[in-house]
Amino acid sequence: MSINSIDHEDMTSITTKWDHSEEYMEEQRPAKQVKSAEARRRIEALREIKESGLTLEEARELGLIH
């Protein structure tokens, strides 16, 4: 099917039938993924601090964690 064979009225009627809740859900996923990635990085940083023998207070003083 070529783009030229699509009827403009059909396209307009289809767009009015879209479920906007799906678009809303897709917008929420990236934010959740970002939070998960941030949590994983923080956990990894805390593991490295623990392995290095630093205390949390020392790590804060060094600016390794906030």
Image (cartoon, rainbow, N blue to C red):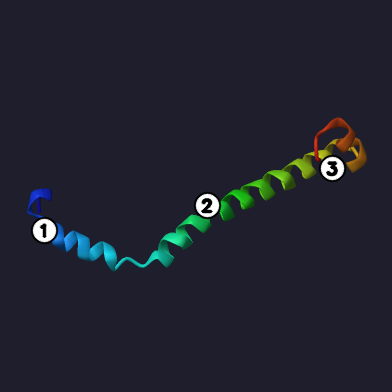
SS at mark 1 in the image: loop
- In percent of width and height, residue 55 lies at 91, 41
Q: Which residue is mark 1?
A: 7
- Quarter of the image with the N terminus in it: bottom left
Mark 3 nearby-residue class (10 Å; few <14, some 14–19, many ≥20) = few
Q: Nearer the viewer, mark 3 or mark 1?
A: 1
| Residue type, label 1 | Asp
- Asked if disc 3 and disc 1 are in contact, CB closer than 8 Å, the reply is no
Task: Specify the quadrant of the image occupied by residue 66.
Answer: top right
- Quick check: 41 above or below 22? above
Numbered label attached to residue 50: 3
Q: Mark 1, residues whose alpha carbon is within 10 Å: few (<14), some, or many (≥20)? A: few
Assign a secondary structure to mark 2. Answer: helix
At x 46% / y 58%, what residue is drawn? 26
Counting from the top left corner in percent of width and height, residue 48 is at 78, 39
Tag 2 residue: 30
Given residues 6 and 54, the one toward you in this image is: 6
The disc labelled 3 sits on which kind of residue? Lys
